[in-house]
Structures are given as C-alpha cells and as structure tokens.
Amino acid sequence: MATDKTHLPVEFLATLAAGAEPGSAAARMAAEQARGVADSQQGGPLLAALLAKPYRESAPTWLLEAAVANGLRQRENEYDHLTGSTSLVVLALVHPDCDPALRADALRRCSDRRLGSLGAAHHPADLCTAVANELHRRVPKPPHMTPELLKEPTPAQVVLRTGRLHDAVFEAAVSLLPDDLDHAQLEDEDSIAWSKRIRKAFDAWGHMWSAVLERHPDRHPQLLAMTTGTSASRLVRDQLLGSVPWTVEPALLRQLALDDLARFDAAMLTVRICTFLQDGSSKEQARQHFAAELAALEETERRDIEFLYLRDGFEARWGTDSAVSWVRRAADGRWRLILNPTEAKPAYGDPHTWQSHPDELADLGRHFAQTAAQALRTWKPKDLYGISTASDLRWIRDMLVHLPELTPAVEATVRLVIRDARRGRSGPQSYDYKSQEDRRQFDELLDAITRIVADPAPQPPATRRTALGNPEEVTVRSLSAVTAEVLDAYLNRHTGDDALVEKALLSFAWHGHRSEPAFAPLLARHSDPRHAVHTLTRELRRRLGGGPSNREAWARQVLALPNCPSETILALPAWTALKARGHHYNSTHPTVIALVEAALGDDPHAWQRFADSPISNSGPNAWLRLGDILTAAADGTAWPKPPGSR
C-alpha cells in the first residue's frame, strides 16, 4: 500500500529492492522511499529487502539504524528467531558496516526473549558472541534460586527458552542460571520457617532445571558435564531421571539410573553401622569395624554418615531405616516415571513418547526392584499407628511389579507390610484435600499389593501390574474391568478352576458389551459347560444381581450359544427373555417366541394368564424365570415367587 510518506506502494518497493542490483537507480530510489516508512510496521519488509540484496555489502548508517529501530519496535512472538522482526535486526547487526557501538546499543535495547532469538544457532558467530557478552552484562553473577524466579525469571532463564541456541550463548546462559540456595537464616526466622523456605527454593530450582532439560534434550550430556562438580550436579541428574526421562537418550538414561542405584550402598552401610551400634558397640569401634567400607564411599556420603551417626549426640536408631527411606524416596520421586512409564503425560493430551524402548525401561525396573528387595530385608513395622502414606507403599508395589520372581521371603515380609498398613489405615485421619488424595492412593496401592501376594499361582512380572488376587476372593465386577489379555492370562494360570471360569462368564453381564474373549470359548474352559451355563442362569439373581442391563447382557450371551438347551433359555428372567432382540431391530428372539408358543399352545386362557403375569423390568419380579411363568400360565397354578437374592 502507498502511504502519505511514499509515492509508491510499499509492497512494490520491497519487491523491486529484492531484485535490484547494488548501486542501481532502482535501489537508490527504493532506499530514498524507505526513509519515509522506516518507522512504520509496513517499512520492515522494504528495509529487509534493501539489506538483503542491493545494500548487502555496503550500507549507509541511517539504513542500519533504521532497520534496528524498526525491528525492535515490532511485536515479538515465540518464533521471532525464524522470521519477522528479529530477522530484520539480524540483517543489520551482522552487516559488514555495522558499527560495534550500534550492535552493543541494539542488544541493550532488546528484551530478554529477543536476545535469545538473536542468539539462535543459525546466526553468525560474531553476533552470538555479542549476545553472550550482553547476557553477562545483564547477569553479572548467578543469583541464589528463589520461588519468585519462576514467575519473574532472570535473563539467562528466558534466553534458554529458545529452542536451539548457538554454543556461545547456550554456555553463557547456563553458567549464569540461578545457582544454589541462600542457606543463611534470615533475621527473626525460626528453624521451621527456614526449613520451609529452603524446601520451596529447592523445589523451584528443580522446576527451573526441568524446563531447561526438556527444552534442550540434545544437550543433556553437555549439561551434565557443565554442572559436574557444582552444587547443581546432583539436581540435574535427578531431574533427568525423575522429571523428563522420556527425553533422555537410552544409553544415557541407563547410565544415570545405574549410577543412582549405586548410591544405595551408602544407605545399606548406614543400616549396618546403626545396627552395630544398637547391639552395644561404641562409635569408635564402629569406625574401626567399617573403616574400609567407609573409605570406599564418595566423600559426601562418608561425611554424611560420620556427621549423622558417628558423633556424640546422635542416636543410632535414627539410621536403621535408611535403606527403606532411600528406596521410598526414589520410587516416590526420581524413579517414579521410569517404573511407571504411562504416568509420563502432560496435563492434557497423549502420553509422552519415550526414547527408551519398553524392554529397556523394564530392565531398569528390574534393577530397581532387586535393590528394593535388599531394603525390604531391613524393613521393620512402624510405630503404634503403622504406615499410613502412599509413599510407604509405592516402592513395595513397584518392587512387586518388577521383580523377576517373588520369593517366599519377599512375600512373607510384604504380608507384614500389609498388616502394618491396615493398622495405619484405621488410625487418625486428616480431611484436607491433600491428605484425602494421599489416602485414596494409599488404599489403591494397598489393594494392588494385597492382590499380587494373594494370588497363589506364579505370576510373570508383566501380569502383576493388573493382578487380580486369589481366585477364591476375586469378584465378578473385578473381572469385568480387565482387558481380554489380562483375563486370559489369569485363567491360564488357574487352569481347571471351574468356580473362576463361572465368575469370568458372569463378568460378561457386568461388562455389558465385552467382545473378547468370546463367551463360547470361555465357557469351553469349564469341565461341564452345559451344566455350568444352566446353573448360572437359574441362579442368576444370587450369583450376579444388578439391574436390567446385567440381565440383558447375560441373556444375549446365552441366546447366542449354538444349540443352547431349551431348559437353560427357560431359566432366563422372563421379562428379559421376552425383550431379547431377534434378527431384526425391535423384534424378539425367535427361540424365545418358539418356546412361549410351545408352552401355551392354543389355549386362550393360558395366553390371558400369561398376559396378566407379574413379570416386570425392575424389582424382585424382574427375576421371575420364563419357564416358571409359562408353567403357571399353562397349568393355571399360583404364580411363583422370585428366586432368592444373595
């Protein structure tokens, strides 16, 4: 469009400049026209075209200044480093005639986000070096981490939100990230307030690093190298394991996981030292007895043990649960997603796609479970109230799910844990939302653990996550909720259990529209299929119960059986049988019609009594059997009573 400052459309001028040769009359004319629109949004494409072609090698200072000013005035967006105003600023700042003072002044005027866009990997090294220098000017030294820096991030944090940064900019930004916490106790701050402040700051520090690691998955090894030996080293490793493990290259994830498990040795040594002390030995004797093992630890681990348990004033009993505490914290935190990959998903949308193959994750789970089994050997019942939080049980469930084999010793100790958890479940409760949510998870975990150890048949690890427990205790409703694969595997492990097969058959009625496994092959698992389906149908109210949908689902399966005996069909609830759909919509099944006609014949009184029968779609009379009603109608006898309930 033309403006009051140009005599020609800006679009025309930009197109003309893009094809003009340096020094040509067309280029000079377009540049003169650009003066009039240099401070408008429409002038941006014209200025960019001039710097990209006719003024690429040599440009007047006013043109470079105008391009910078125009670009910095334009609205920023997440993709500025690809197109738009940032590209215009780049053209000016990388130009051979750009004065260093102009470049430095332009970078000072940039927002933090645009500074990150200017430091993108595909931009020239000189510009990116200048960006890194500007970043150092804005952040002379890394600040201490505080929760407020998540809401009002430093320039280094903002720059690292750019997807792919130049190495110089990336390294500068990482080196200037908030570092460590301010452990100094504030004036008028008691120890409880200090502890809460430090915990909040540490959590914020983890969130910050999690965002950086997720944004730059290709730089994980570099970030590990850059933070080695710093206060952030352990935090970065834990965030890779626990916050964004799906983004980590498989070999690196395995190395991080196994390195983490190697730290468990210090926890086990702590248990042994504290047990040694509880048995009556002195702390000096403990130092001598465990000298070689203490010397083999990393310095920080050795220092922690000596500070906490081998000096006066600290009681040995405080460390006897160190191994259990270690695996509990790991399963509840940094190992949680590796052990339960399907939990790695955003608030909305599909689960994250892992770089590691499921088999690789399962192998890591096996390593964790074997470590947890060592901790289990040191487990002791808790105090008077028992265990009562979800984290007390999560590591047990994860261990059971991933162990290659459940030994009698493991199962025996887990049963003690279950007993302790039931004591804890009956203890005092809080009623705030967080406590109630933890109690809900606690109950789910306790039920899952109980089902795993209650199943008397050997279970491969793949089946334990959906364990159903003892066949004698499993319910029809529980069987209705599992997939066909889980149900088949469960039945295969308990071959010959007719009572379980009968529950599985009834689960079709609870499920409503289960198509797999098919009803007939499932019935064939029974030692006496004909008798089983007849007995279940006659005892449907006692064995199944429920509403109309349950009765209708059972009738569909029975009527679909090939050569189903008439006596079994006559045992169906009358109303349900009469409603059973035939070959066409809104029609009754032909077998039911045939049985009714055969029973009532041509007797008008029988038909009238049948029409006046007490059958219904709900209530106790909904369970009246078709055969009993037809007999009473044909013989003129009293109507039968509904069959007994559970």
Image (spheres, helix red, strand yellow):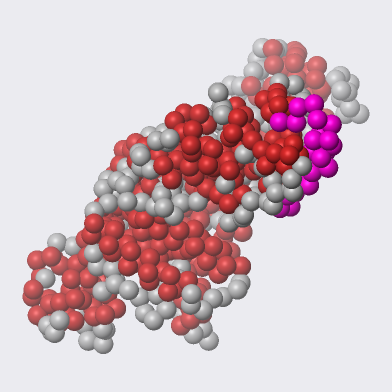
Q: Residue at x 69, y 16 (%)?
A: 18
Answer whether residue 505 is magenta in the image.
no
Query: Can the viewer see residue 376?
Result: no
Q: Residue at x 67, y 42 (%)?
A: 628
Locate the N terminus and report the quarter of the image it occupies: top right
| Residue 355, picture quadrant | top left
| Residue 561, picture quadrant | top right
In the image, 159: left or right of 273?
Answer: right
In the image, 420: left or right of 306?
Answer: right
The residue positioned farthest toward the right in the image shown = 4
Q: Nearer the viewer, residue 318 or 26?
A: 318
Q: Nearer the viewer, residue 195 or 163?
A: 195
Q: Position of residue 514 (x, y in %)?
A: 57, 35
Q: Position of residue 120 (x, y in %)?
A: 53, 36
235 vs 325: above or below: above
Query: Can the viewer see residue 260?
Result: yes
Q: How many marks?
A: 0
What is the magenta range? 599-621
393 vs 40: above or below: below
Q: Residue at x 8, y 75 (%)?
A: 288
